[in-house]
């Protein structure tokens, strides 16, 4: 019988969560590096370069890879021959205590993103608890932990289907994936759970994302099982869709496909697909009673030396003087460097603005959006001499329902976020001759370095969802929807799907 100390378990959870906030798994970095060298679409290659540079900066600076530091998801396998030194806390409570400490670490505070009462007040719990914990009793005298910090943008794109036994899983994935848009911040991985019941398939899909990136080894050895065959087929066909990094079109949408399956009812074929984003974050450890887990930091020389050059003819924009006429000359796909003042706002701030405008109260004091840009972001708190913590874009699609109101009633000139806009929103942008710009999701620490000043101007009680004024210098963005309604998230994947087909035919 092995005795596991409660303190060792809690300390290990805390260390693991700090570790994954700034270290990508090395296998994921190596897969991204390969994707970077292979990529032929410049916009997608630039996006992967930013993700890799951001990753290295986070590893060096011990600051979060992404401003969304995730919902803690933990698989705990407890050996049947394990005894705990104390029994006043359950495994869930111990994971929560480790989470609480990790997210409130003063040297590297992580963004608390969890809200209680999700169907009601949605009040932030302030310490990112509770975690989602799956516990298994297994043979042996060890405790095994696989822990992840799962981004909301990718989790929101989960798909589930109860297929007919004769349906094709490949067809379902290929039909579902383009509908998921780019809010899951590709390139990443797809975890697919097959079989059992509906809820079992979901847990399998999530657990499969904890496996290492090893598709190349599988390609080299060849498929031996139905699962392996499916992985290879999906890996090829998903990448042939041409969705590419950040949905800009390109050769790599996924760096691996992971699958777990269990037996199911003869009448059923439950399938769940969960994407993992550019901020793939997980680590595994074992406790054998000898102390807390010894999670070794990776070597920084293992990160690729990637440089990212902006062309000399890149457009520079002064946000303090930009005019509607100027914006109309910007072209979809163009890289723009922003300097000057912008306001921030995401879900909760938009909701409050909508409520105020509906009641005829106008914008809150200090908020003037006339000819301004709004950045969809919820930053991590600053530490030391930082102006702001990691501050990458959040999924713009969630703000679609407010966009017509913002453009027609506030004089807003443009928005900055990540991923695609819906058709009605693109039409609204076109009508108002506005523009939508995208920053790279998963490059939050890099983006934060362009922010030179930050202050809260309204809704302070919303914490990271408050309206800030950011003063930026040379913040790189891409024109995703221009004032004529040209939309890179529609055009890019369509062009690259055809190019990939042509490349395959030419071979
Ligand atoms: S990379 Fe994208 S999906 Fe992933 S945590 Fe960051 S913002 Fe969310």
Image (tube, rainbow, N blue to C red):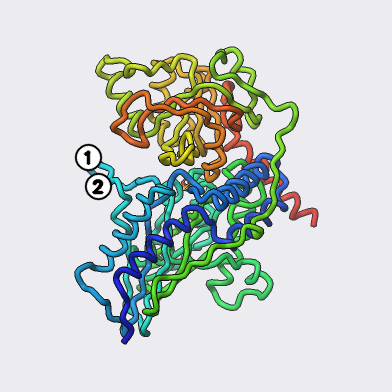
- Give above or below for 311 relative to 365: below
Determine which quarter of the picture holds residue 162. Answer: bottom left
Q: Which mark is residue 102?
A: none
Q: Which mark is residue 121?
A: 1
Q: Foreground: 54 or 393?
A: 54
Q: Position of residue 441 (x, y in %)?
A: 53, 42
Q: Residue furthest bottom?
A: 1
User: Marks 1 and 2, Cα distance to the nearest angstrom?
Assistant: 8 Å
Tell me what residue is drawn at x 48 percent, y 41 percent. 390
Tell me what residue is drawn at x 49 percent, y 55 percent. 276
Is residue 203 visible to the viewer in this orientation of the structure?
Answer: no
Q: Position of residue 405 (x, y in %)?
A: 38, 21
- Give above or below for 79 relative to 307: below
Secondary-structure class at tag 2: strand
Q: Which residue is mark 2?
A: 116
Secondary-structure class at tag 1: loop
- Give above or below for 277 relative to 191: above
- Give above or below for 296 relative to 50: below
Is disc 2 surrounded by few (<14), some (14 to 19) or many (20+) residues within 10 Å? some
Quadrant for the N terminus, please.
bottom left
Is mark 1 in CB contact (under 8 Å) with mark 2?
A: yes
Q: Position of residue 249 (x, y in %)?
A: 63, 43
Q: Foreground: 404 or 339?
A: 339
């Amino acid at each position: 019988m092995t005795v596991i100390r409660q303190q060792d378990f809690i300390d290990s959870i805390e260390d693991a969560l700090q570790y994954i906030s700034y270290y990508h798994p090395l296998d994921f970095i190596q897969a991204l590096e390969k994707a970077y060298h292979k990529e032929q679409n410049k916009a997608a290659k630039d996006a992967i370069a930013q993700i890799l540079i951001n990753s290295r900066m986070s590893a060096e600076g011990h600051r979060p890879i992404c401003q969304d530091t995730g919902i803690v998801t933990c698989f705990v396998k407890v050996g049947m021959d394990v005894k705990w030194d104390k029994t006043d806390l359950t495994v869930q409570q111990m994971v929560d205590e480790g989470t609480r400490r990790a997210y409130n670490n003063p040297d590297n505070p992580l963004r608390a993103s969890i809200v209680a009462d999700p169907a009601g007040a949605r009040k932030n719990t302030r310490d990112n608890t509770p975690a989602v914990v799956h516990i298994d009793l297994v043979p042996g005298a060890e405790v095994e932990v696989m822990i992840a910090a799962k981004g909301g943008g990718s989790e929101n794109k989960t798909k589930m289907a109860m297929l007919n036994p004769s349906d094709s899983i490949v067809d379902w994935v290929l039909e579902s994936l383009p509908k998921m848009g780019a809010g899951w911040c590709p390139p990443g991985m797809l975890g697919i759970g097959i079989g059992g019941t509906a809820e079992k398939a979901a847990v399998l899909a999530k657990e499969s994302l904890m496996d290492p990136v090893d598709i190349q080894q599988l390609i080299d050895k060849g498929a031996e099982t139905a699962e392996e065959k499916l992985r290879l087929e999906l890996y090829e066909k998903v990448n042939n869709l041409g969705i590419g990094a950040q949905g800009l079109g390109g050769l790599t949408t996924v760096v691996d496909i992971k699958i777990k399956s269990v037996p199911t009812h003869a009448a059923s074929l439950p399938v769940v697909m969960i994407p993992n984003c550019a901020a793939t974050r997980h680590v595994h450890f074992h406790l054998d009673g000898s102390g807390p887990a010894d999670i070794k930091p990776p070597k920084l020389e293992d990160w690729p030396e990637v440089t990212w050059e902006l062309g000399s003819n890149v457009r520079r924009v002064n946000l303090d003087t930009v005019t509607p006429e100027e914006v109309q000359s910007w072209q979809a796909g163009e890289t723009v460097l922003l300097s000057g003042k912008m306001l921030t706002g995401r879900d909760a701030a938009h909701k409050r603005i909508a409520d105020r405008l509906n009641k005829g109260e106008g914008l809150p004091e200090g908020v003037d959006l006339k000819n301004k840009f709004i950045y969809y972001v919820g930053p991590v708190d600053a530490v030391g001499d930082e102006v702001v913590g990691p501050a990458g874009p959040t999924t713009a699609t969630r703000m679609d329902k407010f966009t017509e109101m913002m453009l027609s009633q506030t004089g807003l000139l443009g928005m900055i976020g990540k991923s695609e806009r819906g058709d009605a929103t693109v039409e609204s942008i076109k009508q108002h001759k506005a523009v939508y710009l995208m920053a790279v999701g998963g490059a939050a620490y890099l983006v934060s370095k362009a922010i030179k000043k930050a202050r809260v101007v309204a809704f302070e009680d919303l914490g990271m969802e408050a309206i800030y004024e950011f003063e930026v210098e040379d913040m790189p963005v891409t024109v995703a929807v221009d004032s004529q309604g040209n939309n890179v998230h529609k055009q890019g994947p369509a062009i690259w799907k055809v190019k990939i087909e042509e490349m395959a035919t030419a071979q």
